[in-house]
Image (cartoon, rainbow, N blue to C red):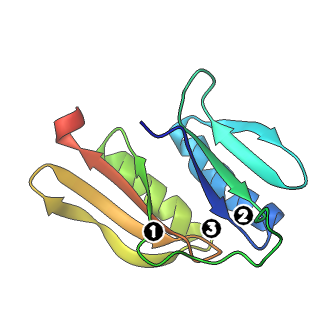
Amino acid sequence: MIGYVMLGTKDLARGGKFYDAIAAELGAKRLMEDEQLIVWGKPGHKADFTLTYPWDQNPASVGNGTMVAIEASSKEQVDRIYEIAMANGASDEGAPGQRFETFYAGYFRDLDGNKLNVYYSSMSA
């Protein structure tokens, strides 16, 4: 259902390095970039991720209640992505762990304060 996700940034180069590390763990790469934005994804995959300077040229801000969820292939990959995020300057919003019987997740904020979740669900396995 989701075509792509776009988050605003205050520093595209800094944010680009942060998301390059997470994308690499997921087998994704930069598909498109210019001075306004960077798009990551897997060739042929419909859902991509974009980091951009806001198009209205106002400062980027974090939406209250807004969160992007990244699906991992295993609990171990959740742990790795969370550690990659922490090592690249993320702030902790909840270490990886079992949240519900079928849902394992970790939460963090990126360098601009955007909230992300990396999760594995045995319901989609």
Q: Residue at x 76, y 49 (%)?
A: 38
Check whether the beta carbons of the residues at disc 3 and disc 2 lie within 8 A of each other.
Answer: no
Residue kind at label 2, given as amino acid type: Gly
Q: Which residue is mark 1?
A: 66
Give SS at disc 3. Answer: loop
What's the CA distance linking mark 2 and mark 1?
A: 18 Å
Mark closer to the observer (3, 2): 2
Q: Is residue 38 above or below residue 3?
A: below
Q: Position of residue 18 (x, y in %)?
A: 67, 61
Which of the 4 image quarters holds residue 44? top right
**x, y percent for residue 26:** 52, 40
Q: Residue at image x 33%, y 48%?
A: 76
Q: Check residue 15 in the rendering and tell me which mark sits there, or answer none.
A: 2
Q: Residue at x 54, y 64 (%)?
A: 85
Which SS class for mark 1? loop
Q: In which image quadrant can residue 1 be found?
A: top left
Q: Residues within 10 Å of mark 1 (few under 14, many from 20)?
A: few
- Tell me if residue 111 comes above or below residue 23 in the rendering: below
Measure the alpha-carbon separation of dots 3 and 2.
Answer: 10 Å
Residue 113 or 85: which is nearer the viewer?
113
Vertical placement of residue 14 versus 91, above or below: above
Name the amino acid type tagged 3. Asn
Name the kind of residue labelled 1 in the image. Answer: Thr
Question: Closer to the observer: label 2 or label 1?
Answer: 1
Q: Earlier in the sequence, mark 3 or mark 1?
A: 1
Query: Hey, which quadrant is residue 41 in on the image?
Result: top right
Circle 3 crowding by C-alpha within 10 Å: few under 14, some 14–19, many from 20: some
Residue labelled with disc 3: 88
The kind of secondary structure element at disc 2 is: helix
Quadrant containing the C terminus in the rendered view: top left
Which residue does the image show at 79% across and 38% down from the upper left? 32
